[in-house]
Image: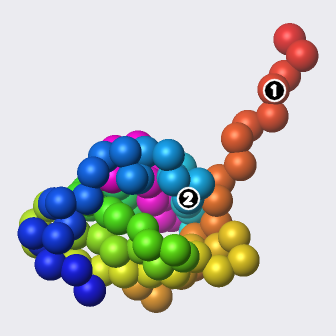
Amino acid sequence: MRTAAAAASVTRKDSATHPYAGMWVTADGYIRHELLPGGRYDEARGKRRSAYQGRYWIQGDHIEYLDDTGFTADGDFRDGVLYHAGMVLYRESAPAATGR
């Protein structure tokens, strides 16, 4: 696991263009984990928006998190699924365009 100092040294560009950036959601929709451009994340739980926020960085298929409170966590992407802290999250699909 990286230290806070190492996490701070990651440039914004590293995460801004990463293919794993975007919204990841548990099957029941309770947890919504957004990997934002610029290396930040915002996690909602149920009706509680921004329950957790912090930085993330990705190396290969492994992701490390540093919460704004100092808590650290990690996870792995396997076959299009994010396994993080005992949770299984799936990429949220973009809503289909309507012909209206």
Residue 31 magenta: yes
Circle 1 — which element? Answer: loop
Name the residue located 65 percent from the left edge and 53 percent from the top edge: 92
In the picture as drawn, the residue positioned furthest to the top comes out as 100
- Answer above or below: position of 66 versus 17: below
Picture coordinates of residue 33, whole percent (x, y): 45, 59
Cα gap from disc 2 to disc 1, whole angstroms: 22 Å
88 on left or right of 4: right
- Quadrant where the image shows the N terminus: bottom left
The three-letter code of the residue at mark 1 reads Ala
The residue that label 1 is drawn on is 97
Q: Nearer the viewer, mark 2 or mark 1?
A: 2
Answer with left or right where residue 94 lies relative to residue 3: right
* Residues packed near mark 2 inside 10 Å, few (<14), some (14 to 19) or many (20 plus): some
Which residue is under mark 2? 20
Identify the residue shown where x is 35% and y is 65%: 57
Q: Residue at x 52, y 74 (%)?
A: 60
Is residue 8 shown in magenta?
no
Give percent across and percent down for residue 6. Answer: 17, 70
Give the quadrant of residue 48.
Answer: bottom left
Q: Which residues are magenta?
A: 28-40
Residue type, label 2:
Tyr
User: Left or right of 26: which side holds 99?
Assistant: right
Residue 90 placement (x, y as % from top left): 64, 66
Q: Nearer the viewer, residue 62 or 53?
A: 62
* Nearest the eye: 65 or 31: 65
Name the foreground residue: 63 vs 60: 60
What x and y, as percent, mark residue 91?
Answer: 64, 59
| Residue displayed at 25% across by 59% down | 10
Q: Is residue 50 visible?
A: no
